[in-house]
Structure formats: C-alpha cells, structure tokens
Amino acid sequence: MAAVCAALVVRHLGEVSLLTVAEEVRGIGAAQWLIALVATCASFAAAGQYDALFHRWLGTGVRAARAGVSGAVAIALAQTLGFGLATGAIARWRALPELSLPNALRVTNYVSFTFMAALSVLAALALSVSDIGSGGAGVSGLFVIPPMVGYLVLSVAQPAWLPVSLPPLRLVGRLTVLAITDTALASLALWALLPAGSQPDFSVFLAAFLVALGAGLLSGAPGGVGPFELALVTLLPAVPETELMAAVLAFRLVYYALPACAALVVLARPSVDRALRRTIVPALPPAVRAEAGLARQSGQLSVVDGLGLHVVEASQCLVALGSPVCGERMTRPSLRDFGDLARQRNLFPALYKADARTAGVARRSGWTVLAVSEDASVSPADFALDVPERRQLRRKLGRARKAGVTIESAGRLPLQDMSRVAGNWTKRTGGERGFSMGRYCPDYLAGQRVWLARRDGRLVAFASFHIAKAEWCLDLMRNEADMPDGTMHALIAAALEAARAEGVRRVSLAAMPLESGHPVLRRLTCRREAQGLRQFKCSFHPRRQTLYLAAPNLALLVLAGTDILLRIAKPLPLLASTGLSSTMRPMQGGHSNMDVVPAICRPHVGGNRTQMTQEKNR
C-alpha cells in the first residue's frame, strides 16, 4: 500500500525536482525551525501522557513520569520504523525493565487503538467544519455519532463477551483532550515550516493533516511514507507542491528523525526505577465494620486521609461502600481526598450504602444524595422472642421445629453439600449478584462464621456472617427449593443467640429495600423477591437505618446508580479458588476476618486492578 501511494505521489508531482525541494528546505528560516521544534517537544510531552494514564488504569505500578518517558520513546520509534504494535511493545519493554512483555503489549494495544479511534473522530469532525473535500465532508461529523453512542453503552455495560475491559469514560475524555493537543501541536510543527505566503488557514490544514496522519498510521509503513504525502497533496491543492514537499521533508527531520534518535539514546541505557525499593505504607487497624470482610472478594481497603475505606471499582466509578471501616468519621477533606483518589484512577467518585452522617457530609460538600436502602440491625443483648413485634418470627421458628429442622454452627465446612445447595440456588434464581454482595466461594467462606440447617441429616440451607470485634454482618443465604418454611429464620436466630453469648454488640442483617422512596427505586424494589427479603428481615424487628447513594452531581449520580446496578446484576466471573482443602474450618471467635484471611475468590477484570492494597492518597 505504501509503495503504491508513493508511486502515485511521484506521478502526481510530475516535474517537481528534488533539487528544488532541497533548495526550499534550505530557505526555511530559523524562527520556523524553532517553532517546529518547540511544537514537536510539546506534542511528544502530551503523547507520553497516554502511557501514564493507561499504566495508572491497568495498575502496572510504573510511576507516571517513567510511563510518560517510555510512551514518548515508544511512539517516536514506532512512528518512524513502522509496525507500530510490535515496535511500540518492544520499546516499552526495553525502556521499563520492571515491566513484563505481556503488560508492555497490553499498554501498547490500548494506546494504539484508543489513539486511532480518537484520531478518526477528530478527523471526521475537522472535515465537517472545514472547506476541504467534497460536499460529503460537511456531514462527516454525523458518522461518528453512532460509534460514540455505542462505545458509551459498551463502556458502562462492560458485557461479558468483550475480550478486554473498555477504558472508562473519564479516561477516554482525558485521552481525547491529549489527542487534540498532540495532533494540533504536530500539525503546527508542519504548518510552521511552510512559507508564510503558502500557509492555508490552520483549521483547513489541521483537517488535512489529521486525515494524512491516519492514512500513514494505518499503512504501517515507516514514517507513513507515501500515504501521508498523497493525502496532503490531494487535500491541499492550493499549496504549491514544491513548498509542501519541502515542508514535509523538514517535518520528517524534526518530528521523526530527531525524536527517534533521542529514543535510541534512552533505550541504549534504560534506567532502573530506584523508587521501587520497599516503602512503608500505613497499616489499617482492625476493621470496625464487619462488612469490610467483603473486600476479600470485591474491591480493596484503601487508606484515604487516615480513614479506612472499602472501595470497589465499577466500570465508570470508584465506589466507597458503606461508611469508613476504621478510623474517624468521614469529613469534607477526606471526601475531597477520596475524589482525588478516584480522579487518579480515571474514575468518578461515588458513595454507596453510606449512613446518614456520611451522606450529610457529602450533601454539605455539594454532592447529590439519594436514599436507596435501609440497613437492618439487631442488638443480640436485647434480642428476645417474647415480644409482640416478633410474633411472625415465633411462628416461623415453630414451623421449622415441627418440620424437623436442626441448626448447628459449622465446625468444618461440608463443602460438597454446601456447593450442592449453592449451585441449586444459583440455577433456581438465575445467578448470584455481586459487587456489594458476596458470592459463594469455599475459600471466601473460610473467613466467615457459618450456620447450617439440616433436615433428616441432609443439608437444606446455610447462612454466613462477616465478623469483626464488636459486630457481625449477614452475608450469604443459600437454600434448597424444598427447604421447610422458617428454616432461614432459624439460622439467623441461632446466629443471634451465639452473638449474644460471645458479647457481640451488633449484628447487621445487611441492607433491605426501602419501604418508600424515589419512584424509580420503588419500581426496582416492587419485585416479589425484594418484598420477600424485606418481610423476612423485618420479622426480626430490627433497628432500621437509611442508606444513601451520593455523587458530585445529578448526572454522575445517575451514572453511578446505573453502573452499580449493572455490576450487581451482572458481576464479572470469579477467579479460580486458591486451592484450600476441601473441608475447612471457618472463623471462630470475635476477631476481624480482615486480619486473618487474604484476598481470595476475586472477580476477573480485564483492564482494572483487583488486588488487595492499602493506599495513602497524597
């Protein structure tokens, strides 16, 4: 393709002499060279930030400054030598000794494909507002609308059939700004090398340059030679051909040859990141909130302004689940720092299932807040069956006893039976929920307290609890279809009795749907399952506390709500088990399970990070 385009350029130029072109190059003034050189440096500085953003998103651990340099080096060599994916990956691998080749290839693929997508959109938009080309160019901007809408939907939904995770919208927005800056500066470098009397309007020249750049990159030819020149000559007929070719030749010296030489110097002696030495990170104290145990499967615990937050990455948002798991209460400065942490990860900040105090801080900070659910909790010390408010619970427990149901606290977990119950439950209900809800995994259950329900010796149901020093939190409830009525009530009642005996002050039955709230939420919670869950938890006469969703503005609140709902309804598949023994003993006593059991049974995420970390937001 490049050879054909080069032949067409030679044929099109006709009588243009190479000596004449060389003479035009010698006539370029010092000020023009200086402008082109400065624009080139600024363009590569912007281009290097593509890598910095993707290294942060992919969680490679490479610092932004080193990522930016490696990105600029890779782009300089790839655009000059051609074969961009292979050249770029090898250059990044060489520039960053701490980076594995697969990760270098991942970064290269993301940078290449997102830049080409952004370039296509920018070229179409530039053509639509310029005077270049035929009448069809004026409507070229309309053709980018369907792909942009399609990407928006796919980026938010992240369907399971996608081979990789699509970059979030906030990251795409930053990449677009960088692409505009990068290509505009590169265009300026070439435009400045044209004689003043031959320079077309910059907006016209920019549109032609974007098309030419795209043609050159798609050809895969070294420097895009052939397609680049052919596109410029075709789209800029008013520019004298000799002067245009002279400017292109000078541009290749400034924008291709010089950066490539500088890149080779960098790669000749790649530096080692001395900042990779072991550093001390602030340790989290034992979790106060038992629900922090969910971080072993979903999200991670992060230190933000001295607070321990359970944060989970959705497709577009960094979500802080619940209130701080340890440390002081949320404050406006800590909320601001959390927003900075989300920005660093190229995500939007959101709070989900936040208590009234935390929601109040968010509201006073200008965030939009919406009540979404209620937390149901019981004080084991005050739990008694002989009160009018628990008459329904007494009836349910009586039915379970009459059916011959026996309850026991699990010693060693009967994983084969539990897997049968969980598997049948999953098939019957259409699949497990995720994100803010635990999912069945033997290793995950090993860090919890578990109660078993049997009938005639056969396991028919089980319930598990996250545990902390002073509170427990209900997590999994799984049962067979033929479970006798009242069995699940009996499991929870037995756990409450055990909590009282161990001096636990509070047991959370987890969140339940609001009885009344926003009309949209009422439609979502009017299903039979949601109403049944609320009725089940209310039978224990719990203390109810409203929980909130919060985001910086209404638009982001809608985005966060959609994002969270999709992640709950369609969670990513879990990674394989860590291979603990098939019969395991669950947690005993009142210690925080976050102090004992490592992060296991995690969702598989293509682009986002999933490891358990402790971060100090700077």
Image (cartoon, rainbow, N blue to C red):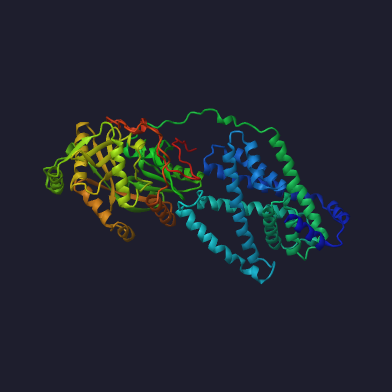
Q: Position of residue 443 (x, y in %)?
A: 36, 35
User: Looking at the picture, does residue 449 appear above or below residue 30?
Assistant: above
User: Looking at the picture, does residue 230 appear above or below residue 491?
Assistant: below
Identify the image quadrant of residue 287: top left
Identify the image quadrant of residue 261: top right
Q: How many marks?
A: 0
Q: Is residue 578 left or right of residue 142?
A: left
Q: Is residue 234 left or right of residue 556?
A: right
Q: Is residue 504 left or right of residue 198?
A: left
Q: Position of residue 77 (x, y in %)?
A: 70, 44
Identify which residue is drawn at 65% across, 44% down: 86
403 or 207, nearer to the observer: 403
Q: Position of residue 314 (x, y in %)?
A: 44, 48
Identify the image quadrant of residue 466: top left
User: Looking at the picture, does residue 70 appear above or below residue 174?
Assistant: above
Q: Is residue 420 left or right of residue 173?
A: left
